Amino acid sequence: MIKKLDITDPTMAAEINVLQKNAYKVEANIIGYFDLPPLNETVQELQQCGEVFLGYVIEEKVVGAISYKMSIEILDIHRLMVHPHHFRKGIAQALLTYLEEYEPSIHEWIVSTGTSNTPAILLYKRNGFQVLNEVKVNEKLSITNFKKFVEK
């Protein structure tokens, strides 16, 4: 089941923070960069991020989540995470599909991921995202930015 999460609730924020650290450790290993901001974020910082969170819940436990911010015309996905024990179960895809249905008025979407994060890049491309550009953050990290237009 997918549902909206209250990230201001300390218990929920702590659960998401643990999920985030588990998921982003895998990304850090994939891209070879271990100073990703989600790995260092505190529960309090997470609570104050201003993002909307949707969670994929199994037996009352959040095993996947997607977060975003919206302007009038653009939806910016900030996080998409799945607990490693639940990889390859279609959870990331389900969250993306649900979000598109949850926010039907949005026509333009953006998202970013590490350029070496092949699983995420393939997921975004399968869902109609096009590479916008690549940005070299430092000697060890490059980010690929994507954009998607949804016709309604």
Image: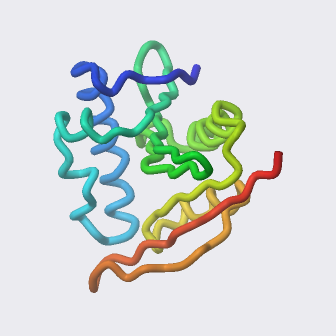
Image quadrant in which the C terminus is located: top right
Q: Residue at 33%, 76% (x, y): give it.
A: 141
16 and 85: which one is in front? 16
Residue found at the very far bottom of the displayed protein: 139
Q: Quadrant of the N terminus?
A: top right
Can you give x and y, in whole percent of width and height, for residue 14 in the image? 23, 28
- Percent x, y of residue 104: 71, 36
Q: Residue furthest right?
A: 152
Front-most of 147 and 83? Answer: 147
**Residue 73 % position (x, y):** 62, 50
Residue at 42% from the left image edge and 80% from the top image edge: 135
Quarter residue 131 falls in: bottom right
Residue drawn where x is 33% and y is 63% of the image: 29
Does residue 142 appear left or right of residue 70 in this picture? left
Q: For residue 28, which quarter of the picture? A: bottom left
> Would you place residue 142 above or below residue 105 in this image?
below
Residue at the front extreme of this rendering: 72
Q: Is residue 128 above or below residue 51?
A: below
**Snapshot colouring:** rainbow
Left or right, 59 with respect to 104, comes to: left
Query: Percent position (x, y) of residue 10?
Result: 22, 21
